[in-house]
Amino acid sequence: MKRINLNLKQLGFSFITTIAIEIARGILNESIKEVTPVDLYNAIKNNQDLWSTTPEDIKKAGRRFKEKFGPIIEKYKDEINVDLVLRWLKEDRPELYSTIINTEGGIEWISRQTEIIKQKIFEEL
């Protein structure tokens, strides 16, 4: 019985973690819904800091995400990385994915931006 309870706890924790990561994906999609490939190309070329231009409502969504899922996602926050973001972009916004991978310095830029935004959202956990 003890083993079954432990397995159910692990399953529940895994399920909640999956939901939290999908919410992070939704926040990303919401924050870039109006971004065009030209906008993205210019941001990469100008080394634009995305956090400084992120609208306040998106930042608030990030803070709410941290409040709801912070303790859970803290253990898995390293899984939210540039590879995951690129996979999401490839699936959800292939035109932006293409812009990143085909622009010189694009991968490095999105990697830096991912870490900066993640740090801002998860700081003080």
Image (cartoon, helix red, strand yellow):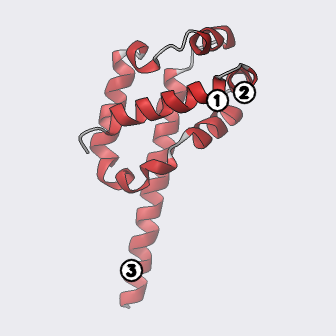
Per the image, label 1 sits on a secondary structure element best described as: helix
| Rendering coords of residue 48 (x, y %) | 50, 13
Mark 3 lies on residue = 6
Q: Which mark, residue 107?
A: 1
Q: What residue type is labelled 2?
A: Ile
First-in-chain label (2 vs 1)? 2
| Rendering coords of residue 122 (x, y %) | 33, 39
Q: How many labels does the image show?
A: 3
Does residue 56 appear to the left or right of 32 in the view shown? Answer: left
Please tell me whether residue 59 is drawn above or below residue 72 in the rendered image. above
Determine the image quadrant of residue 92. Answer: top right
- Along the line of sight, the residue nearer the viewer: 3 or 40: 40
Residue drawn 65% across and 32% down?
Answer: 89
Mark 1 surroundings within 10 Å by alpha-carbon count, few (fewer than 14), some (14 through 19), many (20 or more)? some
Please tell me whether residue 12 is drawn above or below residue 112 in the rendered image. below
Q: Which amino acid does label 3 sit on?
A: Leu
Residue drawn 50% across and 24% down?
Answer: 30
Q: Marks 2 and 1, Cα distance to the nearest angstrom?
A: 6 Å
Mark 2 and mark 1 residues within 8 Å of each other at the beta carbon? yes
